[in-house]
Image (cartoon, grey):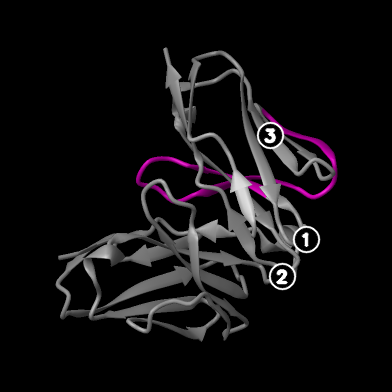
Amino acid sequence: ETGVTQTPRHLVMGMTNKKSLKCEQHLGHNAMYWYKQSAKKPLELMFVYNFKEQTENNSVPSRFSPECPNSSHLFLHLHTLQPEDSALYLCASSQERAGGAQDTQYFGPGTRLTVL
Amino acid sequence: GQNIDQPTEMTATEGAIVQINCTYQTSGFNGLFWYQQHAGEAPTFLSYNVLDGLEEKGRFSSFLSRSKGYSYLLLKELQMKDSASYLCAVEDSNYQLIWGAGTKLIIKP
């Protein structure tokens, strides 16, 4: 496997379910990101991890819970979601988070989440 | 506040040239990125500009003017596969990427 992978690619869940999204990067990067992408809106940064430490949480509701066990893996745990949380969830990685070209982010294919 | 503006949608003809503009107002500047995103797929990196001027990569070129808060992506010899959304993003002084909403480019035969 190369690049950034995400599973599952599609997820349908009820508001009372608990599920997890998984991201894995094979690029040797040290920073990983979760984004939410809704139709016709800019990408919304949710969480950032740099060298396994969470460095940003952009006012994300607590029903979204990230986990970064190592520099290659990132999870997003979901519980008690709302229908408005339906979106494409993208994971990305970069060499690190220090400004400039090394912050170029490489994205996974995303998980299309539908909350019923 | 921080803001990135780019046109919502553009249409061009196969074989032609198209220029997609991006203007920005951010707290500091550490570089500007262009990404391509085909429908239902991940954004893929196209270019990075940090100094004023034109960067050329094959059929794609990206221009930056920091004094004007302006960039454009130039696509030459358009092909049908270039139909996609093009995202402009600026890294601010806190290393945060500020994203535009994207420009949907439609290529017609």
Q: Secondary structure at mark 1?
A: loop
Q: Left or right? Give the position of A113 relative to B96.
A: left
Q: Nearer the viewer, residue A73 or A33?
A: A33
Q: Left or right? Give the position of A92 relative to A104.
A: left
Find the magenta span and give its range: B33-58
Q: Residue at x 61, y 57 (%)?
A: B98
Q: Which residue is mark 1?
A: B28
Specify the farthest residue to the front. B1
Q: Earlier in the sequence, mark 3 or mark 2?
A: 3
Q: Chain of mark 2?
A: B
Q: Earlier in the sequence, mark 2 or mark 1?
A: 1
Residue A102 on image: x %, y %: 72, 62
CA gap, disc 2 and disc 1: 8 Å
Residue A1 on image: x %, y %: 44, 62
Q: Secondary structure at mark 3?
A: strand
Q: Residues within 10 Å of mark 2 (few under 14, many from 20)?
A: few
Q: Is residue A7 visible?
A: yes
Residue A94 sits in quarter: bottom right
Q: Which residue is mark 3?
A: B72
In magenta segment, residue A65: no
Label 2 amino acid? Answer: Asn
**In the rendered image of this protein, does residue B57 appear above or below residue A3?**
above
**In the rendered image of this protein, does residue B7 appear above or below residue A6?**
above
Q: Which residue is mark 2?
A: B94
